Image (cartoon, rainbow, N blue to C red):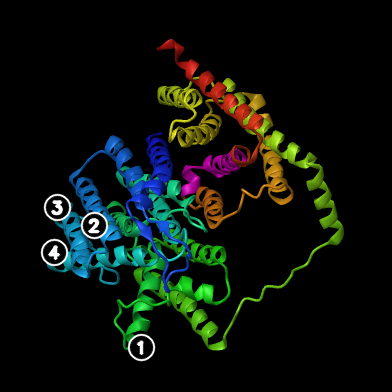
Amino acid sequence: MIYFFVALTALAISMVMISPLIHYGRRLALIDIPDERKVHLHAVPRVGGIAIALGTFLPLLLWLPMSQEYAAFLLALAMIFLFGLLDDWRDLSYGWKFLGQVVPVLIVVLYGGVRVKYLPLVGLEEIPDYISIPITVIAMIGVTNAVNLSDGLDGLAGGLSMLTLVGVAIMAYLANGDQLVMVALAIMGGIMGFLRYNTYPARIFMGDGGSQFLGFSAGVLVIILTQQVHEAMSPVVALFLLGMPILDTLAVMSQRILEGRSPFSADKNHIHHKLLALGLDHYEAVFIIYVAQATMVCCGYIFRYFPDFWLVTLYLAISVSILTFFNLAHIRGWKVERGAGLSSPTLSRVIARLRQTGLLTHIVYWGLTLLVGGVFLTSALAAGNVSDDIIVASILMLACLVLAKTFPRLRGLHLVEQVVVYATAVFTVYLVHTGEAGSSLTHALDLPVFVAMAVLLVVGMRLTRSNFFRVTPMDFLVLFLAILVPNLPDFHDQNSALATAVPKVILLFYGLEFVLNGGMPIQQRLLRYLTMAALLVVGLQGKTWL
């Protein structure tokens, strides 16, 4: 349960911070101005890294068992974030930027003891410190800058980092690396709170403070995973976890060197630039890179115990295939052609008529309101012996909803209210799948209720006037992780309940977003009241000890 609190707290803090950061980012001149190398057309605040950092640090300071290793990591992480934030504000020289990366890396390596001890293809013996320390420093600085350079499209760096951290968290969990799992989940929560506002067209950027924060975190956590927590796996797995940022950076720098330019010169030769040059739109380019990164992470997970030589060969084969495709596309001048597509006039008329009457819209919104709220309340009513931490959390969340209802104009409380409602969806599924809400009626209605919810969502997104609900690369990322992660080999054996629980949480999330952002006020109020009633019912389970 502590994992849930860490991730949810990070998500809540990150989401709540976004709105004031957008406001004050413009006042503090922390703005990303468009130029010839950038794809956005308007000035955007680049302060999202602050939300990610605060969302990460606060839950870890509350719940992470603090060893010297992780104390050094958090200190170094704070330092590299502050240097990145200063760079966003004052545009530091290369010397200061390098210093702002080297010092945190040395803190983690020398004080925290985070080092590359095993190299691929050289056997199982530890390498000496005079080799280990320089390799670790170079690797961490390289990964930090690789993720920083991948921050070229809305949602790209955050999504790639999310996929890396998912791989780290799963493999650390299987190896009983509880501290590493908590750190990865905290950063993932911070990213998720930020990503919804960073998908195209982004309202906020993470800036160098955020991208260096994520790059440094990814580098350190991957080294801890492969070199300390899970030494049985091949160290080559690190290449797969950091797949696309590493490949992109090495490919771009190699091309610059071959052209007789500095490897650090600016250009538009990154993979995301090449995808846009093929005629793909912003969403499509980001989604394709997500798929490539997810493929690499999955390969790293599935083949983590394979021999080093085999894994190096696989990584090179994937990398060469990707780069060969882009070379062929450039030579032959490939472009994506967008036709008018096929459509049925009869179907178009039926859809138009359904939209005009408004009946279908009412059915979708009222149906989702009653289904989501009904799931909340029936699960709470069917709950038996609820654990104390669930009861306390329910009471606290109910207090937040009451506060938001009492002071509706207080800044930030609206976002807190939304976070509580979404957290109730997680509580609901948790109660059912841990057996704490196990009535036969609840289980009997489980499948038809969620099938009906899925149908209403599909119909609503296709037929209603819900322009607010746009499917973004982040939605694909969430759905991909929801379906894939619980069904991974080994992980599924230990967590079979997740295979059905996670998709239900996702359905509830999308149902909530649909109603809270597009429904009528009466439907939104009803859903909030049902949420409060569910939390009250769960909270009353503690009457024996209050």
Observer-nearest residue: 97 or 292? 97
Sequence-first disc among 2 and 3: 2
Q: What residue type is labelled 2?
A: Phe
Q: Picture coordinates of residue 495 (x, y %)?
A: 49, 42
**Callout 2 secondary element:** helix
Q: Tag 1, which secondary structure?
A: loop
Question: Earlier along the polypeptide chain: callout 4 or callout 1?
Answer: 4
**Labels 3, 4: front one:** 3
Q: Magenta includes 84?
A: no
**Nearer to us in this view, 397 or 135:** 397
Q: Which label number is shown at residue 83?
A: 2
Is residue 182 visible in this depiction of the protein? no
The residue to which callout 4 is attached is: 129
Q: How many residues crowd mark 3 within 10 Å: few (<14), some (14–19), many (20+)?
A: some
Secondary structure type for disc 4: helix
Q: In this view, does 447 lie to the left or right of 488?
A: right
State the mark number for residue 259: 1
